[in-house]
Amino acid sequence: MLRRLYDATMKLAAHKRASWALGGVSFVESSVFPIPPDILLIPMVLARRHKAWFYAALCSIASVLGGILGYGIGMFAFDQLGQPLLDFYGYSDKFIDFRANYAQWGPWAVFIAGVTPFPYKVITILSGVAALDPVVFIVASLCARSLRFFLVAGMLWKFGEPVRLFIERRLGLLSIVFCVLLVGGFVLAKFIISG
């Protein structure tokens, strides 16, 4: 089943409208969607290595625009949209304490969440709630998301075929590692916010 899913994703990655899907996933992941755009970015770069830099730029820009939406949710619609999202992901406990300390290290939180598996959407919403300077938020987001997506695309561009063979040979193991990192990011977010 995993192999069929991988093959279908590779086929989708080579589709002429795959860029729209990549941009859409990058946008919504930054504010509400739990799955990172790497799921599409990686096979898309492997399918069309000559477009690696375009895909990285697309992910970066769409992700920052989605982050601005998350910031807006936090700033203008926290009670209606932000709080239910935090409740859904289990991040509501001790949110007030975390919010009070956020102004001191918010830019670093945005950067770290933008580069690591930590759920970036939590930080985008929190930045709006805490009224982090929007320019600082956008610059930190742009730097972090660009670093992340250009690094992934660059590695795939440079080592494309060996990476593709590595993924295809170890698909099951890599799926487990990805899930552990994804869940670990959410657990880390919950730990940091509630601690």
Image: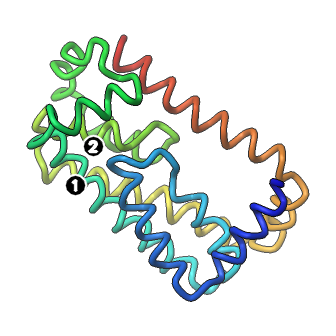
Are there few (<14), some (14-19), or many (20+) residues within 10 Å of tag 1?
Answer: many
Q: How has the structure been colored for display?
A: rainbow
Q: Residue at x 72, y 72 (%)?
A: 10
Q: Is residue 20 left or right of residue 109?
A: right
Task: Quarter of the image for the N terminus: give it.
Answer: bottom right
Q: Residue at x 56, y 88 (%)?
A: 16
Q: Residue at x 76, y 63 (%)?
A: 6
On residue 114, the disc is none
Give coordinates of residue 34: x percent, y percent.
Answer: 47, 44
Query: Observer-nearest residue: 39 or 164?
Result: 39
Q: Is residue 39 left or right of residue 177?
A: left
Q: Is residue 138 left or right of residue 3?
A: left
Determine whether 171 is above or below 125 in the image: below
| SS for callout 1 | helix
Q: Residue at x 15, y 19 (%)?
A: 100
Rounded to the nearest whole Å, what is the CA distance between mark 2 and mark 1? 7 Å
Mark before the other along the chain sequence, 2 or 1: 1
Give coordinates of residue 94: x percent, y percent.
Answer: 27, 12
Determine whether 177 is above or below 145 in the image: above
Q: Looking at the picture, which amino acid does disc 2 mark?
A: Thr
Label 1 near label 2: C-beta < 8 Å?
Answer: yes
| SS for callout 2 | helix
On residue 124, the disc is 2
Q: Looking at the picture, which amino acid does disc 1 mark?
A: Ile
Pointer 1 residue: 68
Residue at the limit of the structure toward the right, as seen here: 169
Give coordinates of residue 126: x percent, y percent.
Answer: 23, 34
